[in-house]
Image (spheres, rainbow, N blue to C red):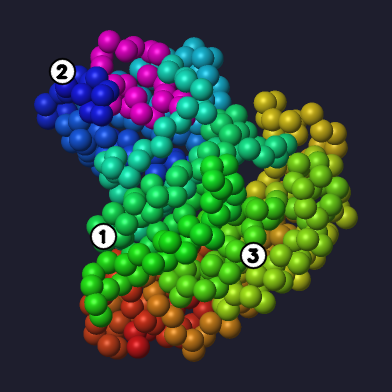
Amino acid sequence: MRSVKGIPTLTFNHQKLHLVSLGCAKNQVDSEVMLGRLAQAGWTITEDPGEAHTIVVNTCSFIEDAAQESIDMILELAEYKKNGICRRLVVAGCLPERYREEILQTMPEVDVFLGTGAFDQIVTAVGDLRIVHEAILPDPDRILYHGQDSPRALSTPHMAYLKVAEGCSRSCTYCIIPKLRGSHKSRPLEEVVAEARELVASGVKELILVAQDTTAYGGDLVPAVSLGRMVDRLAGLSAGKGRKAEKPWIRVLYGHPESIDEEFIHAVATHPNVCPYFDVPIQHVSNHVLKSMGRRYTRDSLRDLFRRIRAQVQGASLRTTVIVGFPGETDKDFAEMLEFAEEIRFDHLGVFVYSDADDIPSHRLRGSVPKPVAQDRYDQLMSAQMDIAAGNNQAHIDKTYPVLIEENLGNHLYAGRTYFQAPEVDGVTYVNTALSGHELMIGRFVRARINDAMEYDLMGEIV
């Protein structure tokens, strides 16, 4: 018997573990920290569930589709307990937190359920065979920061999500996150900077700041700290010395219209290595729908915000997400949103069809929108955005940008991203080196001239 950071564990020599991470970037950070703890405790991590003695699933249940995906994945991996060498199945994260003890009866295949306040108990959960068919569900407000000195197994060595806060203190009627993750809790500034410094020193070329409400960072600290101040600090980090010193990209995801202030906008505008990329989920623009959603801003204030960003930040890229089919949404409300999207011409726009559940406040609202109507609105908005994105991409032709190379596709073709493309959610930039003959290294920046554009992706060549 030994312990990792005070956590008692039973260690099994030559035991292999497979972990599946579902959901958002914040979940990915949790998964990477769990993998780091497990590797430190002596487990061998494998990408093949067929050779794993223990399988862990870090779940999402933000909306119905995400919860169903989590359930399907659990049941699929449970087959390895029946027909393979797997002897232990652990499920962590938002799914057990949302459905709590009742999940014990519905999923007998699972040995241990860990709620969002129990990630720090992962080593015990996988290693202590005395824990059988239990749900460990401490208060999510007791979620422990992993700290910059905690082991972490990065999914990609050149890019890392940096969680700056946990939970959310807003009251959006469609959202379950405060129940699953507790209230907003900012990490101390110096702790975030220290972790960022270590990540950059390890070779990370892009730091992506994430939280449920990232732009609300620091307001709960004593004394208060602003996100703009954090960005200023992180922008000064670099790897190497002298002329070879290289600054990482800094990118911020998951902002909120109510908490984006002038200091943050100024910080983005000031530093060349801070991506002028504003991810601001607005959810809707109809004033009465916004009120029903619990969002305390208006269509006019949104218009003003985006105009100020574009006026102050050269090359600003705007991303947003919206919900169609929210209870009470009329044809007029949807028309307002479609018109707004065509007016602002977002660089990236994601659309969700409203997902109902009996444990969220919006379930009690009147005016349910039939699913076929909601789906039709989704299709209309996505079709309009495809045309907008294609037009925006045409404007990039003949311009030269730094591109972070992420994949070798073969035949002299590589895939990467520019500053206006976030991982997973946006398009990519393909770089063709057939003419130059260059071999590109994954995780390095190159300069590429854009010579072709598609609806969402770009094509370029080395300059």
Label 1 near label 3: C-beta < 8 Å?
no
Give residue 417's position: percent from left, percent from top.
Answer: 42, 69
Does 112 sit above or below residue 44?
above
Give residue 215's position: percent from left, percent from top.
Answer: 58, 53
SS class, disc 2: loop
Question: What amino acid is labelled 2 in the image?
Answer: Met
Which of the two discs, 2 and 3, labels the residue nearer the N terminus? 2
Is residue 145 in view?
Answer: yes
Q: Quadrant of residue 50?
A: top left
Q: Would you name the residue on which mark 2 appears?
A: 1
Front position among marks 3 and 1: 3
Q: Would you name the residue on which mark 3 appears?
A: 262
Q: Quadrant of residue 246?
A: bottom left
Q: Magenta segment: does it hold 113?
A: yes
Relative placement, left or right, of 159 versus 354 is left
SS class, disc 3: helix
Q: Which residues are magenta?
A: 112-134
Nearest the eye: 410 or 344: 344
Q: Would you name the residue on which mark 1 appears?
A: 201
Mark 2 residue crowding within 10 angstroms, few (<14) / some (14–19) / many (20+): few
